[in-house]
Amino acid sequence: MHAFVMRTPQGQRGWEARANAILPGGVNSPVRAWNAVGGQSLPIASANGAIVTDAAGGAYVDLVGSWGAAIAGHANPKVVSAVTRAAKRGLSFGATTEAEVELAELIRDRYAPAERVRLVSTGTEATMTALRLARGATGRDVVIKFAGHYHGHADPFLVAAGSGLATAGAPDSAGVTASTAADTMVLPYGDVDALTGAFAQHGERIAAVIAEGAPCNMGVVRPPDGFNRLIGELTRNEGAVFILDEVLTGFRAGPAGWWGIERDVALAKGEQPWVPDLVTFGKVIGGGLPVASVAGRADLMEQLAPLGPVYQAGTLSGNPVAVAAGLATLDIMDADAYATLARAADEVREGVHEALLASGVTHAVGRAGTLFSFFLGLDEPPVTFADAARQDTGLFRSLFRHMRAEGVSLPPSAFEAWFVSIAHESPITRQIVDAAGSWRPNERAN
Ligand code: PMP
C-alpha cells in the first residue's frame, strides 16, 4: 500500500518522517523546503487554475506557480488535452519530431535574437551549454556573473548565486573545485566601473558575461537603465559572448521576455535595441513539463554538434509530450493573455503594496514587467545582492505564515518572485490583497 493517507495531523507527521527518511531534506529541490520560513510543506495532491490543494485537503491560492512554469494556470485544459493527445502518439522517440521544429520556430518568431534554437530539458542544461558554447567559440575560459544571479546548478555558476543559496545563506557550494570557481568572476550587479574595469584588466580572458534578463533570484530587481546595453557593447568590443538568461523572465516578464521590454523602450526612443548573443529559456516554454532551450546567433549556435565542435546532447531533449505542453502554453499566451497576466500582476503588486503601506510596514517593491516581489524592511528597491540581502527575512517569515493561515501560498523565501498566472482573476487577487491587509507585522515569527 503506497498511497498517502493524510487526513489527520498524525498522518502529516507520518508523512514528514517518511519523506525525510528517503529524500534528503524531504525534497527533490532545496527551494521546496520550508527551512527559511520555519516549517515543512505538505505534499501537493493537485492543482487547478490558481489553486493548489494539499494532501490534507487544504486549498490555497498559489503564488509559486511551479516557480514560473504555470503561467497559463495549473492543469489548463488546453495544455492537458495537448499533452494527452501527444502521449497517445508515443512518449519519446529519440528522433526529431515536427512539434520540436514548431516550438523552436515559435520561440524565434516571438524572440528575434533566437536565430537558432536547441531544446534541452532544464534551465541548468541551457546555461551550461551556453557557457560551453561561449568558451568553445572564443577559446577563452573566464565567465563573468553577477552576485545574486542564479543560473542553475552547474559548477561554474554556483558562485555567489541567489535563489535557494541566498535563502540558505550559503555563498557557494561544496564540491565545486577551486579551479572551476577561479574561472568565474563575480561582480556586483549594476556596477559600471566594476564591469568596465574587469574588461580593461582581463578582456582577453573573458569568454562570456552571463546575466539574468532582470534578476529575479534575489527578489525581483529592475536592471539599471543602460546596464544590459553596456554588457552588450563591452562583450562585442572585446570579442566575448553576452549570455542573457531568460529562463525565468522569458515569455513571462512580457511576451518577449525582459529583452522585449528593453527593445520596446529603445525603439520608442528611436534607438537600435541591444541584442544578446545567446539566450536561455526554460519554465514557460515547457508549460510545466521539462523543456528549456539555448538559442541565439546562428553562427554561434552552429558551433554545436553535429555541425560544430561544441558537444551537447540529451536522451529526452525535445521530448514530444513536454514539447506539446510548451506549444499549447505559448499558443494560449497571446496578446490578450499577456494583458490578463499584466492585470493580475498589477492587482496583486499594487494591492499588497497599498495594504503594507496602510499597516505601516516599511518595504520596497521590486518589479520587472509582470514579475514582482516585496523587500520588507527596505526603503528603496535594491540593485545589488548586498542591498537585497538587507531585507528583513524574519518579517517575511511572519508574512509567509500569516498568508498561509489566510489561504495564500507564497514562495517560501524572501528572495523569490511571486508568480501569478492568467487564472489569477479578480476575486482571487482580492483574496491575496485582503490577506496581506490583515497581517500585523508584530505577529513576527521567530
Ligand atoms: N536560470 C534562471 C534565471 C533560473 O531562475 C533558473 C531556475 N529557477 C535556472 C536558470 C535553472 O533552471 P532549472 O531549475 O530548470 O535547471
Image: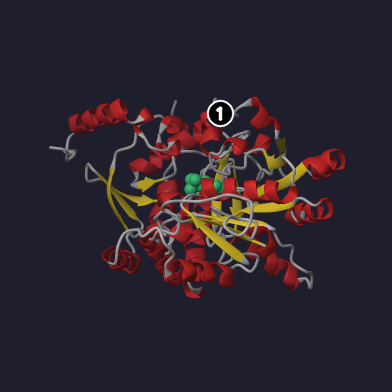
Q: Which colour scheme appears in the figure?
A: secondary structure
Task: Confirm whether residue 60 shows in the render.
Answer: yes
14 or 208, which is in the foreground?
A: 208
Amino acid type of the residue that numbered disc 1 sits on in the rendered structure? Ser
Residue located 78% across and 69% down the image: 272
Say which residue label 1 marks.
173
User: Assess mark 1: CB under 8 A from ligand 1?
Assistant: no
Image quadrant where residue 17 sits: top left
Residue located 31% across and 27% down the image: 20
**Left or right: 3, with 87 as reference point:** left
Residue 422 horizontal/vertical position (percent):
42, 64
Residue 218 horizontal/vertical position (percent):
59, 41
**Left or right: 206, with 373 as reference point:** right
Structural crowding at the residue carrying mark 1, measured as other residues with C-alpha within 10 Å and reported as few (<14), some (14–19) or many (≥20): some
For the N terminus, the image quarter is top left
Residue located 43% across and 29% down the image: 445
Q: Going by the picture, which residue comes out furthest to the left?
A: 1
- Image position of 298 with respect to 41: above or below: below
Task: Confirm whether residue 193 shows in the render.
Answer: no
Residue 51 horizontal/vertical position (percent):
32, 54
Disc 1 is placed on an element classified as loop
- Image position of 52 with respect to 155: above or below: below
